[in-house]
Structures are given as C-alpha cells and as structure tokens.
Image (spheres, grey):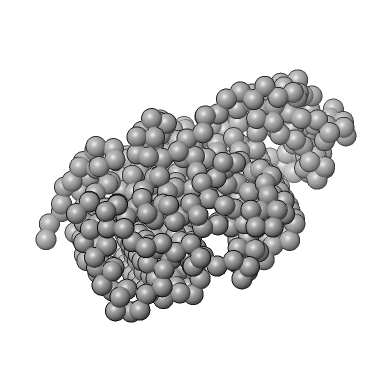
Amino acid sequence: MQNQNRTCEHCGKDFSITLEDLTLYKKVGIELPVICFFCRVKLHLSFWMFGKFRKGKSALSGDSLITVLPENSRYPIYKLSEWHSDKWDAMDYGQDYDENRPFFDQLKELQEKVPHPHQGGIKNTGCDWCDDVWNCKNSYLSRSMVECEDLYYSYRNIKVKNSIDVVVCFESERCFDSVNCYHSYRTFYSKNSRDCVDSYFLQDCRNCQNCFMCWNLRGKSYCIKNAQYTKEEYKKRLKEFKLGSYQSIQKYKKYFEEISKKEVIHKENFNLKIYNSNGDYLLDCKDCNNCNTISESEDCCNCVRNGWLKSSIDVSGSMHLELSGNCSCCQPNGYALKYCNWSTSRYSEYLDICIDCENCFGCVGLKKKKYCILNKQYEKGGYEKLREKIIFDMKKRNEYGKFLPYAMSAGPFNFSNAFLYFPETKKEDILKLGGYWEDVGENNIEGIQTKDLPDDIEDVSQDIITKALICPKTGWRFNIAQNELNFYKQNNIPLPRLHFDVRIKENMKYTTVLQSYPHKCFYCQKGISAYYPPDWGYQKIACEECYKQNIN
Ligand SMILES: [Zn+2]
Ligand SMILES: [Zn+2]
C-alpha cells in the first residue's frame, strides 16, 4: 500500500489519502473519499445549523417554539418533546425503493416528509432561546453548551456560569468576551488562559490575579504589560484606564492584537496528553491523525469536533462512536455507522436523525427499528437482498460511499456551522453543489445606530432595555436584556456595538483553523507546522520543547 493521490470532486484541488487513512478505511469498511478533507468537513458541518433564533410553530400541535432552523424549512418541525413522544410514527412515511431513480433523490424526498425536532439537547430549564443545549439553566441566545447557567450570547462552553460572549470556555464564572479559558473567574477580553481571576486582556496566562494586558505569565499578581506593580499602584492605574468606555476598550483591543503578533510566545498547538497523535486541540488522545478539537479518543483520522471516538475516520461533530466513518453529528453510542447524520444507531448506513436502530439503510427519524429501508420494514433476508441491490445501483450512479449531498443539508450554508470553519466560501460554489444560501440584506428596521450609544456604561440609562439597536455590520437588530445590563454595570463593561452572532463569530475564528502552516520555532529555528494562518502575523511561535523550557 502507498499514499493515493486524487483530485477533489468539489474544489478541484489535489489531495492524498495516507497509509494511516487507508488502513482505517479498510478497518471501518467504507469507500475511499472522492472529496478532500476540507470539503468533507465542510459538507458534514453544513448539516448542523448555526441559524438565527426565530419564533415558529410546531407542525404537530401548533404550539409556539423557538428554533434556529430556517423559516422555509424543507421539512415539518415538531417541538423536541413531541418529536420524542409516541404521538407520531416515522414508519408512516415509508417508501418503496425505485430502481429507476437515484437513491439520494428518494432519500431526500423521504427526509422532506419526516418531521424534525425544533431544538437539539435535553434536560434544560429556561433555555428556550438556546440550541444544542444539555443540562443547562436560564440561558439566552447561546448554542452548544453543557451544564451551563446564566449564559448569554455564547458558544461551545462546558460548566460556565453567569458569563457573556464566551466561546470554548470551561468551568468558569463571571467572564466576558473570552476564548478558550479554563477555571477562570472574572476574566475579561482574554484568550487561552487558565486559573486566572480579576484580570483583563490576558493571553496564555496561568494562575494569575489582578493582571492587565499580560502574556505568558505564571502565578503573578498586579502586573500590567508584564511589569510588576504594587497593589496600590495597580489599582490606581486600572482606574485611569477607563474600562467602562467603548472607545478605550477598542484602543486596548487593538493593542492586545499587536502584542499577540509581536510579543506573545504562541505554543505550537493546544494539544494536551496525547500519544502518537497530531492536529490541534487534542485532549487525551492516542493514535489520532489529522484531527482537530477531539478528546478522549483513539485510533482516528480526519475527525473534527468530537469526543470519545474509537477507530473512526472522517467523522465530524460526534460523540461516543466506534468503528464508524464519514458521519456527521452522530451521538451517542453509535457503532459501525457509515454515511450517517444526527443518528445514534448500529450497523447502519445513510441514516438521518434515527435513534437506537440496528441494520437499517437510508432511513429518516426512526426509533428502535431493525431491517428498514426508506422507513419500510423488511424481513432480515429481504432487507439484505434489497440493500445489496441498492448499493449495486448506487455504485452504477456514482452515489455509494459519498456522504449525503448538500441538497439534504440542514439549511442555508451561510447559517450553518460549516460557515464558521469556512467563512470564505462563495455562494455560487455552494449552489453549484446543490446546497442552500440565504442572502443577507440590510433589513432597514427602525432602531438606534450603535454609534449613537453613550460611550461609557456609566452614562447608560435603564430604558436602554426597551430600545432596538442596529448592528452596523449586518443591519440586524438586537436588544440589551435586563440581566445583561446589570452585568455590564456591575463589571464596568461598555455596551456592545455589534450583533451577538457577529461577536461570537469573531471570537470563534481562533478555534476553527483546520489547516496547518509551516513556521519556524522562535527559539531553536526548527521547522514546525502550526495552526496559525500567516495573516494573523504571529512572530513568536515555539515548538513544544522550547515552549516547555521557556514558558511552562
Ligand atoms: Zn476539496
Ligand atoms: Zn524550538
């Protein structure tokens, strides 16, 4: 066996299938890919909406609901609790297989008849205005969160409380506008820091308290720009910084970016406890190759945003999956799944939102079924014969082995998770592939232009919560909630000027780089590959060993 070189059917670029890939493709038993790694992730994540929250009605009960699924959704939307109930049966939509038509067309037809749940997640209170939310309380306009409370405008957090505008944070409280921070309390405008308290504009700091605009510090207090001050001096200086003013925060943000470019020592990657693995944001991984944002996994290739995977390849956004390939958003307890989406099942292919099924092929919305094809029940023997016939036909039409097509994706590409990872994607390219796009025009709605807001939070009056604000970047309207205003006043934070989804996306860009670039270690000049695009302008990137010697 040797590396195989191919040309991507989507983007036209050359890509290679490595030996590790080939071994795993064989083990999992899926066809070799015809599109490159990036196009695979892009397609997978287009099945996961990052949509605008909107009000709607359940197609079953007429009850009102709040969803990120598009207004003109291709399928009926049921309330999550109704969807999980026995008030309907997905088997009612069963279809016969028609050998004269492409299988994907028939599966899409079925997909458009079967109801989908309005929200992802379970066991929440007061989280109606959230999506992909698990065991959370009283949160608002936030997505992808586990065991969080009082969270506003945030994305991808675990055990975070009472915070606003936080992205990829863990076990933290009272934080604002921060990315990739752990165990932090009252840290603001910070990145990649751990165990810090009462601090502002930190980059790669650990165990620091009362620090302002610092980088690569360990166990310090009362520092400004990495210089030591006395407690009294520090407090005096902090007052002079006018942190309640939007203008001065903008000035500091610019300065913070300059420091990131010229002063901060950036670690080669954010991997922790890994063995024989490569990629970025790997935690507790063994034998994982070309993976990104994956934890507690083993023997995986090309997997992005997953946890607890074993022997799987080309899997995105999934958890607790084994021996599976070319799947998106499957969780939990999947085994031997191929080309599946949002499903938790075993020994099955081409499933969409199926739960606890076994030996099913091309089904949508089924629960606890066996030997079904296009939501129709067969005897074991009949199932196997028809399955073989369909695979034979699919191979003739060049369908088999490909993931579900863009035409079956969740909604407009530019409102999906894929757009967070691939923001440069062009509308015409997605339409050409059969996908969807929503043109975002100026809405011309009435409201206050945010440039007219008071500069300092001190001068903001209570009635701001009754006003509609207009984002200068998107023209979208947003509001300031009462609890949010309290938070800003208590913590001396100026009112935001941009729509919350614009703010999230700006912070997300630091954690969504899937492409590595060649760099030289700042210390030893050794060639390294790191996930920092050249246009970020980082001048000091350190290899693992040098970082350990000089910073750790
Ligand atoms: Zn490609
Ligand atoms: Zn080095």
Q: In the rendered view, would you say 304 is above or below 382?
A: above
Residue 362 drawn above or below residue 56? below
Where residue 174 sits in the image (x, y, percent)? 72, 50
Left or right: where does residue 198 sit relative to residue 19? right
Is 47 positioned to the left or the right of 174 in the image?
Answer: left
Residue 39 position, x and y percent, is: 33, 44
Residue 40 locus on image (x, y percent): 34, 49
130 or 300, which lies in front?
A: 130
Please provide percent x and percent y for residue 352: 44, 59
Residue at 63%, 49% (x, y): give it.
67
Q: Is residue 542 above or below residue 273?
A: above
Q: Quadrant of the N terminus?
A: bottom left
Residue plotted at (21% across, 61% down):
392
Q: Nearer the viewer, residue 459 or 49?
A: 49
Furthest residue toward right: 462
Q: Is residue 268 visible?
A: no
Instruction: Tell me, yes or no, if residue 100 can be seen here.
Output: yes
Looking at this view, name the residue that lies furthest to the bottom. Answer: 380
Question: Seen from this angle, which residue lies furthest left?
Answer: 1
Find residue 421 and report its image quarter: top left
Q: Nearer the viewer, residue 456 or 466?
A: 466
Q: Give the total of numbered labels.
A: 0
Q: Residue at x 27, y 62 (%)?
A: 390
